[in-house]
Structure formats: C-alpha cells, structure tokens
Amino acid sequence: MTSGAAISVRGLTKRYGDRVVVDDVSLEIVTGGVYGLLGPNGAGKTTIVRMLSTIVKPTSGSATVNGFDVVAQPRQVRESVGVLPEDTGLYDRLNPVETLRFYGGMQGLGGAALDGRIEELLRLLDLYERRKDRVATFSRGMRQKLALARALIHDPPILLLDEPTLGLDVMSTRAIRDYAKEMARRGKTVLLNTNNMYEAQLLCDRLTIISNGTVRASGTVGDLEEIAKTKGLEEVFINLVRSDRGLES
C-alpha cells in the first residue's frame, strides 16, 4: 500500500461465471476525507464495496484496507471498517440499544464503555428518544440512521457507505450527509458509493466514475470536467458513461 493510502486497489476483478462484474479496477484512496464512487445502476459499485469489506472474494487482483489485505487478513479488515449497506438488515424485534449491544459485542466491546458509545451515537443521530422502541416501528430514514450507528459502534477509521441516502426524506438525508462530513473532518476516510450527482459534488474530495465494471475517470470534479471537456458533474458523468473510450486520469 502506498504511504498515506487508506484503501489501495490494484487490478481488482470479480467474475460470476462468464459475467465480469468488476473488471481490472485500480484505486488509491488517501487517508481522511470523502471519496466518491459513482456509476449507473449495475456498474459494479456495490460489488467493489463488498470485496473491500471481505463479504465477497475477488476473482483476481488485490486490495488493502487500512494496510490489511482483504483476502489474507479479513479479520483485521473487518475491524478497520464500518459498512452501511444498501439493505440495512436490521432485526425488527430488537430496539436500538439491543441492536447496538449485539453488534458491539461482535466487535469485542462491552460494559460501561459500550453503553456510553451507544448513548453517544443514538443522541448524535437523533434516535435517543426512540431507544426503547422496536425497529419494526421505524421509518426507512430511522432504520438507515440506526444502521449507520451500527457501522460506527467500534469507531472504525474507514467507512464504506453504499447508497446511504437512497429513498430517504430530506431531514434523514441531511443527517447522513452531515455525519459523513463530520467523520471526514475528524480524519476518518469515507468511501461513498452513489449515483446522486448533487450528493457527490457536495461531499466528495475526489471521485472515480465507473461503468460496466471499469474505471472511466478519476480525480477532483475539476479534473473530471477537464477530461470530459464539459462543465458540471452531471454532464461529466453522462459523457463519460456514454463514452467507450475508458478515459482515466
């Protein structure tokens, strides 16, 4: 891994039979800040996040997260990341405190330290008043905030957010975005998987656009505008995704 990189990916590929979902992707994500992974539905973004979080093994290539290899050192990788998947996967019969105690215990946390961390996160994400209510009664936005608290329970240095605001109301969306910015301000690394151009431009320091499993371009918004010879991230995205040139800065 290059010095200063939180995530380093080299030639990462994932195949399912004859279908190539991620094709020879390389990324270098420095420590601190928000890095955007943009692409249309089916581009391979979620598969990349799953490989980086050790849920799915690469077919070929390599990736390190916080200096640990995703294949050879999966336990250390899982300890280093907090993952907010598109599907929250919460247990309806539990309340927020029970949910976070369960996942905190899986991370080796317990006692007063865990109780304090649970209260901190529930207050921060405006869920404390509903801490004794079953998750079954929660709105989608509340579930997403609880899933974010679950991802953060062990205070990981790296966050992997997969479409974190998809389908949320304005207030829930603002809360998730504000927290992502706050985590970056605290020196954590946030990988944001999204196809929301406004969100990407608002939050991301650097971005990679992928289509059909391959990298089209990487850089700041200004870099991408120069590559695509157009202004505005939405126009850049459309031009690069439509292009079959496979441009990469």
Image (tube, rainbow, N blue to C red):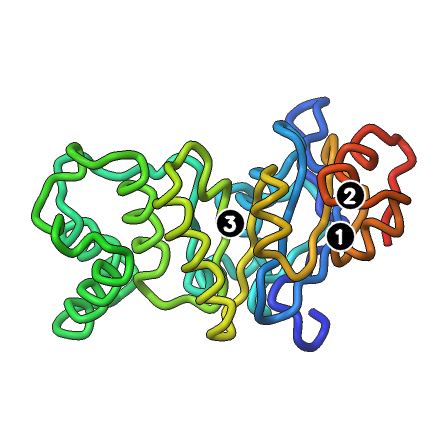
| Tag 3 residue | 54
Q: CA distance from mark 1 to mark 2?
A: 8 Å
Q: Position of residue 77 (x, y in %)?
A: 49, 61
Residue at figure coordinates x 50%, y 53% from the top left: 160
Image-quadrant location for residue 244: top right
Q: Is residue 223 above or below residue 93?
A: below
Side (left or right) of 217 relative to 89 = right
Kind of residue indicated by mark 1 = Ser
Q: Mark number for residue 140?
A: none
Q: Position of residue 111 (x, y in %)?
A: 13, 71
Please report whichever mark, 1 or 2, sits nearer to the chain's N-terminal start.
Answer: 1
Kind of residue indicated by mark 2 = Val
Which of the pair 72/100 is nearer the observer? 100
Mark 2, other Cα within 10 Å: few <14 / some 14–19 / many ≥20: many
Kind of residue indicated by mark 3 = Thr
Mark 1, other Cα within 10 Å: few <14 / some 14–19 / many ≥20: some
Q: Is residue 106 above or below residue 235?
A: below
Numbered label tally: 3
Please report whichever mark, 2 or 3, sits nearer to the chain's N-terminal start.
Answer: 3
Q: CA distance from mark 3 to mark 1?
A: 17 Å
Q: Mark number for residue 26?
A: 1
SS class of the residue under badge 1? strand
Side (left or right) of 77 relative to 209 = left
| Tag 2 residue | 215
Q: Is residue 7 above or below residue 200?
A: below
